[in-house]
Amino acid sequence: MAVDSAKLIDIIKVIADKITENREYLTQLDSAIGDADHGINMSKGFRAVVEKISDMGEKDCGTILKTVGMTLVSTVGGASGPLYGTAFMRAGQAVAGKNELDFNDLVSLMEAALEGIKYRGKAERGEKTIVDALEPAVEALKLRREEGLETALRDAVEEAKKGMEYTKDIIARKGRASYLGERSLGHQDPGATSCYIMLEAMAARLLD
Ligand code: ADP
Ligand code: MG
Ligand code: MG
């Protein structure tokens, strides 16, 4: 795997497209246990991201990821803005100054993104949040590292999907959905879902 700045921008654009495609779906999930804006928040944020990074092909990968994070923080009003924003900023710090990313860099930046979200949101796995999709994915990526990019990435996406689906069976302990307590049961978490969508988009572009 070798991802230069142009390819990184491309991957982020694919993520943005997938988020936009799923705008209604994410908003619908958020209408059940939140305030019906997750798809709106995310697509607005990623629209701004694409505008910001489209002509950053001359910049290093760390700077591009940092710009994605800062743009999300400043354009997304909801909880997801600072959370995903911190994730991308931390990811950028993990690969600061690099003009090309290899598989080990991918693992490092994903670990940093997860740590950023957990630090910012103070959430652990099992609390019905983004962490429930992201943490199993990062673990799979690390665990299957030796088996190569394709196997590790496919497994990571599969684990993220399982984590996302598992959010239906647990009670929300963080964010707006936590106000519902037991009534949050049976509903899939919007943030875990957007996280899965982003990971799947990234993997698809990396493996095509
Ligand atoms: P808001 O709840 O402010 O309207 P969004 O609707 O954009 O923001 O995002 C909601 C999602 O944010 C939730 O589905 C959940 O996955 C995620 N989330 C909320 N609080 C936390 C937290 N403390 N840690 C991790 N993820 C969180
Ligand atoms: Mg919301
Ligand atoms: Mg909101």
Image (cartoon, helix red, strand yellow):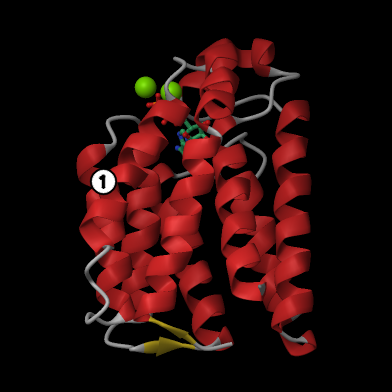
Residue, x 56% and y 47% (percent of image)? 195
Q: Is residue 85 above or below residue 153?
A: above
Mark 1, other Cα within 10 Å: few <14 / some 14–19 / many ≥20: some
- Horizontal and vertical percent position of residue 147: 79, 86
- Horizontal and vertical percent position of residue 54: 27, 63
- Horizontal and vertical percent position of residue 58: 22, 82
* The one of 57 and 163 positioned closer to us in this rendering: 57
Q: In the figure, residue 136 lies in which quadrant? A: bottom right
Work out which quarter of the rendered image holds the N terminus and state it. bottom right
Disc 1 target residue = 48
Residue 75 as seen in the image, left or right of residue 173? left
Kind of residue indicated by mark 1: Ala
Q: Is residue 61 above or below residue 167?
A: below
* The one of 33 and 1 positioned closer to us in this rendering: 1
**Residue 173 visible in the shown view:** no
Ligand 3 sits in which quadrant?
Answer: top left
Residue 158 as seen in the image, left or right of residue 79? right
**Residue 184 visible in the shown view:** yes
Residue, x 43% and y 61% (percent of image)? 12
Residue, x 24% and y 53% (percent of image)? 51
* The one of 58 and 71 positioned closer to us in this rendering: 58
Q: In the figure, residue 138 lies in which quadrant? A: bottom right
SS type, badge 1: helix
State yes or no: Cβ of the residue under disc 1 lies below 8 Å from any atom of ligand 1.
no
